[in-house]
Amino acid sequence: MTPRMPIPVTVLTGYLGAGKTTLLNRILSEDHGRTYAVIVNEFGELGIDNDLVVGADEEVFEMNNGCICCTVRGDLIRILNGLMKRKGGFDGILIETTGLADPAPVAQTFFVDDDVRQRTRLDAIVTVVDAKHLEARLDDSHEAAEQVAFADVILLNKVDLVSAEEVARLQALIGRINPTARIVPTTNCAVDIADVLDQGAFDLNRILEIEPGFLGEDDHEHDAAVASVSMSLDRPLDSNRARAWVSSIAAEQGQDILRWKGILHIAGQDRRLVFQGVHMLLDVDLQRPWRDDEARVSRAVFIGRDLPAAQLKAGFEACAVR
């Protein structure tokens, strides 16, 4: 019996709101004839990204309430081992990390666990960065810098929000942090999947130069001031109050919110109202219809620094139809 070739694994990382889920959806929507298992990790206790992934009712495995690089890394190993035992197999595995993940411990998984090392191959770490906020994140976030430093491919996303001169300056800045990564400027992560998959790009020797203790014990810690606030409501929301609530948060709390997203059930509306934002930048859109087999529950998650949890939850509940 011919032994199976190791399954290539692509890790999609990038700071909160950079566009990782957009990239994942582009990959899954391409007519490439391949089968991928998808693992999605979220920082908060309430999972939303799973429902923002196309085909999320198929091969999507979700890990919530912990970062993939520390508290739930054991879950990642268990999921990978489970995938290896399934009949039929996959052409590849895609892992979308939480925006607060340090990619080093994630990559470690493919070298420190014997079964995972033998049956998978870390193909590349693909980092999505937000051209509008990259410099600020490099200044205030250790994770953002690590995500750039460890990348094999960097998508400089949202270049439509900055000038051509700024794009050139950001490319030079990224090059100083990681001179070996390939930089691909994009808008809405519109990229040929050949630029992100099957790269054969992960170079352990390069990583050991960056972090000599890479294969040792993990000591990753998150910024203690960064936390998530999650909420859900099983009553329909009033459209005007919900939109006003979201707008007021952008105006009053936007500076402190690193990433926010929600799926809302609006009274009298058969489609889901989805909002996603980074700081004060916000996108609100009616998306696909609610399915008959899913509960029409409104959910929202905010990730930021020193967020007023009680105030956010009270404002959310006040949007319910009376």
Image (cartoon, helix red, strand yellow):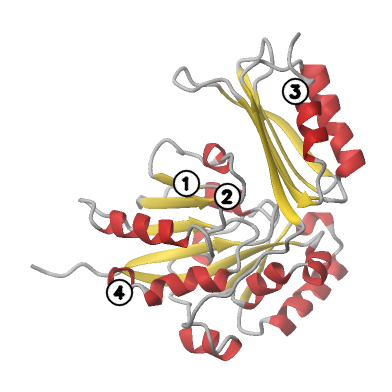
Q: Classify residue 119 by image quadrant.
A: bottom left
The residue that label 2 is drawn on is: 42
User: Looking at numbered disc 4 in the image, what kind of residue is underneath it?
Assistant: Asp
Residue at the image position 58 percent from the left and 53 percent from the top: 23
Sequence order check: which comes first, mark 1 or mark 4? 1
The residue that label 3 is drawn on is: 317
Above/below status of 255 relative to 295? below
Which numbered marker is on residue 62?
A: 1
Residue at the image position 53 percent from the left and 64 percent from the top: 70
The residue that label 4 is drawn on is: 114
Asked which secondary structure carries label 4, the reply is helix
Asked which secondary structure carries label 3, the reply is helix
Quadrant the C terminus occupies: top right
- The residues bearing labels 2 and 3 have C-alpha atoms spaced at a distance of 23 Å
- The residues bearing labels 1 and 4 have C-alpha atoms spaced at a distance of 23 Å
Left or right: 168 as drawn, with respect to 227? right
- The residues bearing labels 3 and 1 have C-alpha atoms spaced at a distance of 26 Å
